[in-house]
Amino acid sequence: MTNRKKVFSAMRPTGALHLGHYFGALQNWVKMQDDMDCVFGVADWHALTTNYADPEDIKENTRQLIIDWLSIGLDSNKAVFMIQSQNLAHAELYLLLGMVTPIAWLERTPSYKEMRAQLTDKNLDNYGFLGYPVLMTADIIIYDSDYVPVGIDQVPHVELSREIVRHFHALYKTEVFVEPQPILTDVPKLPGLDGRKMSKSYGNSIALGESADSIEQKLKRMVTDTNRIRKTDTGNPDVCPVFDWHKVFSTQDERAEVCAGCRGAQIGCIDCKKILIKHVESLVAPIRERRKRFEVEVKDAREYIKTSQLRANEMAEQVVERVRQAIKI
Ligand code: SF4
């Protein structure tokens, strides 16, 4: 038995991971796996809540997700890897929590309204989409998780999970679950290549397995301070997405040089980007190399993480058994 704090986090298998995922979550996961008892999940049922009509890529995306995780340094000997659909206890707990969760709580979830407004090409009038915060709550509390690492925009989700836990405890007059806390992670701002939020669906990302040539081409085309047309124009790094990347990748001296050169029209945007291209390539190159190895080793994601999945399933079964006892069924 360990006194280390327990952490749960998951990703949907919706496509190749990119630098936004790396700086937004994965870099932090790699650190946490050494200090805490972590369960990292592939939320393939969650992918179905919006992609139920086109599920054919989910299995291969799951394999690619595991390959990406391994390639950036996550280790299934340090953390527990699990695939949600391979642990049916999640479904049981989801169902039982669904019995006690008021619909109004789900309808007021900020992301429910936002995603319905954004994903206008999909019919999201399905029960699964409305109920996904309940499934997410089951995912978290089924491992007695103390913490869930999140960005500020996801705090309401964890708060809803806490409300569901408290509601359950009050209803059945027994404490079954650990009430999870959000850990706010300091996420550096890394906009997409067009200045919007980085997202594969916007076509503005650099994948973790991107080729050197593609990194160079993409960064050369990246939007800059739009008021700076010619090299002789002075620029403003404060409004330039490229400079946001320099804040993440470059040394202090390089940033000072770029900043002064841009404001004084002494450095061209291509030369400014060349510094970045070098840094991005040195981060991605070893990941790309490891990807080649894991592409061969991970023939089947379920098979590859089998031992880890068994551990996850055992942990979850213990919690669900406590729930059955609390409900007396
Ligand atoms: S020199 Fe660099 S920081 Fe300045 S506008 Fe060009 S790309 Fe942006």
Image: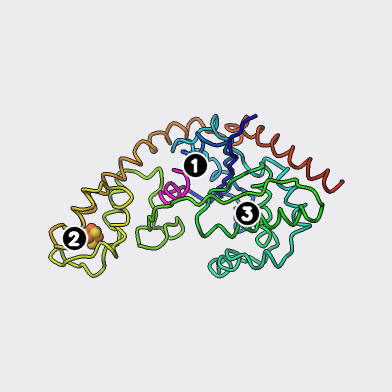
For numbered disc 2, what is the local secondary structure?
A: helix
**Label 2 neighbour load within 10 Å: few <14, some 14-19, many 20+:** many
Say whether residue 271 is visible: no
Residue stretch rendered in magenta on the structure:
16-30
Task: Say which amino acid is labelled 1.
Answer: Trp
Q: Main secondary structure of the magenta part?
A: helix
Question: Which residue is under mark 1?
Answer: 29
Q: Disc 1 and disc 2: Cα gap in Å?
A: 35 Å
Q: Cβ of disc 2 within 8 Å of ligand 1?
A: yes
Q: Locate the N terminus by quadrant.
A: top right
Q: Give ligand 1's quarter of the image.
A: bottom left
Identify the residue at horizontal 32%, vertical 53% (top origin).
245
In which image quadrant can residue 79 be found?
Answer: top right
Residue pushed farthest right? Answer: 328
Say whether residue 37 is visible: yes
- Indicate which disc, 3 or 1, sits on the residue closer to the N terminus: 1
Residue closer to the observer: 179 or 258: 179
For numbered disc 3, what is the local secondary structure?
A: helix
Question: Which residue is under mark 2?
Answer: 262
In which image quadrant can residue 203 be found?
Answer: bottom left
Q: Disc 3 and disc 1: Cα gap in Å?
A: 24 Å
Question: Which residue is under mark 3?
Answer: 48
Task: Say which amino acid is labelled 3.
Answer: Leu
